[in-house]
Amino acid sequence: MRPSTKSILDALDSMAVSRDREHILESRATHIIQGAINLINYIKENYDEETAAELERRLLNSIKGQDPEKFSRGIKRLKT
C-alpha cells in the first residue's frame, strides 16, 4: 500500500471513532435525561406537592454533587 493511501485510511478511521464517541455520548445523555424526566413526573404523580418538591430537589442535588446518598436519605425519611 502506498504511504498516501495509508494516511487517508488512517484519517477516515479516526473520524469514524470520533463520530461513534459523539453518537454514544449523545445517545446516553438523551436516555439519562429522559429517565430523569420520567422519574420526576413519577414523583410528582405519587407524592404530595411538598414531598415531591423535596425529592426533586434532592435528586438534582445528588446529580450535581455526584452523591447518590443524598437522594437515598430522602427516600429513607419517607419510610420512617
Image: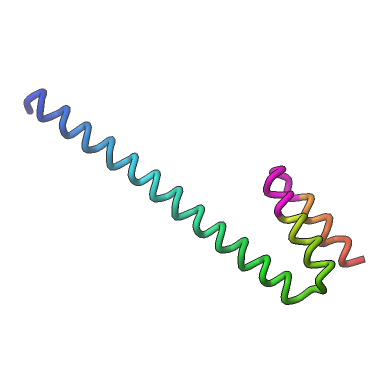
2 versus 28 height, above or below: above
Q: What secondary structure predominates along the stretch shown in magenta?
A: helix
Q: Position of residue 65 (x, y in %)?
A: 72, 43
Magenta extent: 60-68
Is 6 or 50 nearer to us in this picture? 50
Is 61 left, or right, of 13 in this rendering?
A: right
Q: In the rendered view, how is the structure colored? A: rainbow
4 versus 33 height, above or below: above
Looking at the rendering, which quadrant does residue 58 occupy?
bottom right
- Which image quarter holds the N terminus? top left
Q: Residue at x 61, y 68 (%)?
A: 38
Q: How many marks?
A: 0
Looking at the rendering, which quadrant does residue 50 occupy?
bottom right
Q: Residue at x 76, y 56 (%)?
A: 57
Is 40 left, or right, of 53 in this rendering?
A: left
Q: Position of residue 48 (x, y in %)?
A: 82, 74
Q: Position of residue 56 (x, y in %)?
A: 74, 60
Is 41 left, or right, of 7 in this rendering?
A: right
Is 77 or 56 nearer to us in this picture? 56
Q: Residue at x 68, y 49 (%)?
A: 63
Q: Residue at the left extreme? A: 2
Q: Residue at x 79, y 73 (%)?
A: 47
- Which image quarter holds the C terminus? bottom right
Q: Is residue 67 magenta?
A: yes
Is 33 left, or right, of 59 in this rendering?
A: left
43 versus 7 height, above or below: below
Q: Residue at the top extreme? A: 3
Q: Position of residue 62 (x, y in %)?
A: 73, 49
